[in-house]
Image (cartoon, rainbow, N blue to C red):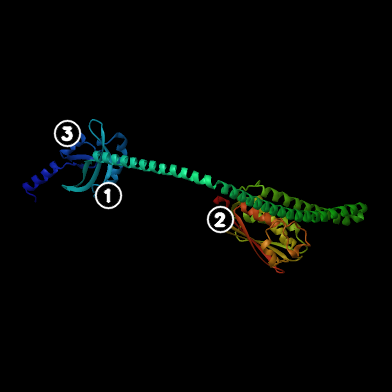
Amino acid sequence: MQNRTDINIYQSIFNSCVEGILLVKNGEIVLVNPSSEILFGYKVDQLIGMRVEDLMPNANRKSHEKLRTNYEKKPEPRQMGVGRDLIAQKKDGTTFPVEISLNVADMGGETMTIAYITDISMRKKAELELQRSEEQLINYAAELEQRVKDRTKKLNEAIDGLQKSNSDLELQITERIKAENEARIALEREKELNELKTRFVSMASHEFRTPLSAVLSSVSLIGKYISDENRDKKLKHINRIKSSVGELTGILNDFLSMDRLDAGKLSASGKQILICDFLHELKEEMQELTKKDQVLELKCATPGVSFNTDPQILKQILVNLMSNAIKYSPPGEKVVLDVIIKDDLLIIKVIDKGMGIPKADQKHLFDKFFRANNASHIQGTGLGLNIVKKYLELINGTITFKSTEGSGSTFILNLKSMNDE
């Protein structure tokens, strides 16, 4: 138990301390030292009973009350110099910067917060003056640097005058080299464009001539079959005309798609579709293009599952791939459409047992107007796979393939849900 002498010593220390000391319980001031009067302009008996926030500007009171409440829930010592710098307000309304350190004390079984408050106006003033001195020093250094730059500029101008004739000559040489390079690049581009035009004209003339000739000859023959007993022959030539017109339509669609894709005129719009139902309808449509005894098989292990993509673009992609699989496979072979959905990833495989792609041709497979050597006798523009690849870029998709000449091909589509955009 403390004696009277000890209490008097503590009281003397408390009263003589130059920092303001506040003893606070739940935000209410319960004890202050005399220095607090000097700091805030209130008498000791006026300070007791006030809220801590009453010693702050109105604008800061709500935020400080929240900080104080959080501190009281988990109090810990906060040393001077590591404390929180705040703005305090005197009785007359003037404000001044303070530094506060905090501690916790047990007073008669009750936990209270001790706040040590120091007026740091002089320190802030000194810091401001130091900052101004530093700014003046920086400005002076910048002025010196500018002077050096100005003098260096004049010296460089003198040197430039001496080197002007050499510089003009070097500039002429550089411009000549640049012009030669640009001319060479333009010539190479023109050569590439001419080659592309030549390939296009050759391909177009061949691909258009064949179905047009078929249409012309079939129309001529139909005119000869007047009697009803020649009905089957008429139907044969009518179907031949339909097939030829379909080929022409496909060629024109390829050209139109290529032009719109290259011009950036196409965009994708995703929506939820039942992927197995969608592919089943597509398989039924494509069945009409199959050769004798060819079968289209759909493997879809997740019926009822929906997927977000652009159905029109996806249909164009699959029609192209399935048409190729049917076209390059012999009669009686099966073409398989294998589908897997994993989370937001759709994997579609188009599998055929057709002629396959020669290994040497595989690296060019997605180039415009490219036809594999073993497919030159089969109708096609060489644009389909190039268009497929560009379509896939619009709907978050990629394409890979595996193929062996004489054993068939597998094209693999990986599509991310358009929900991810």
Secondary structure of residue under mark 1: loop
Mark 3 residue crowding within 10 angstroms, few (<14) / some (14–19) / many (20+): some
- Furthest-front residue in this view: 162
Residue type at mark 3 is Lys
Please, is residue 15 above or below residue 245 in the view?
above
In the image shown, does 177 or 117 lie closer to the viewer?
177
Residue 352 relative to residue 34: left or right: right
Label 3 vs label 2: CA separation? 72 Å
Secondary structure of residue under mark 2: loop
The residue mark sitting in front, 1 or 3, is: 3
Mark 1 residue crowding within 10 angstroms, few (<14) / some (14–19) / many (20+): few
Label 2 vs label 1: CA separation? 46 Å
Secondary structure of residue under mark 3: loop
Percent x, y of residue 131: 31, 41
Task: Determine which of the numbered discs, if any, sits on residue 43 in the image.
Answer: 3
Task: Determine which of the numbered discs, if any, sits on residue 74 in the image.
Answer: 1
Q: Earlier in the sequence, mark 2 or mark 1?
A: 1
Percent x, y of residue 363: 66, 63
Please, is residue 229 above or below residue 72 in the view?
below
Task: Determine which of the numbered discs, if any, sits on residue 344 in the image.
Answer: 2
Q: Quadrant of residue 232?
A: bottom right
Residue type at mark 1 is Lys
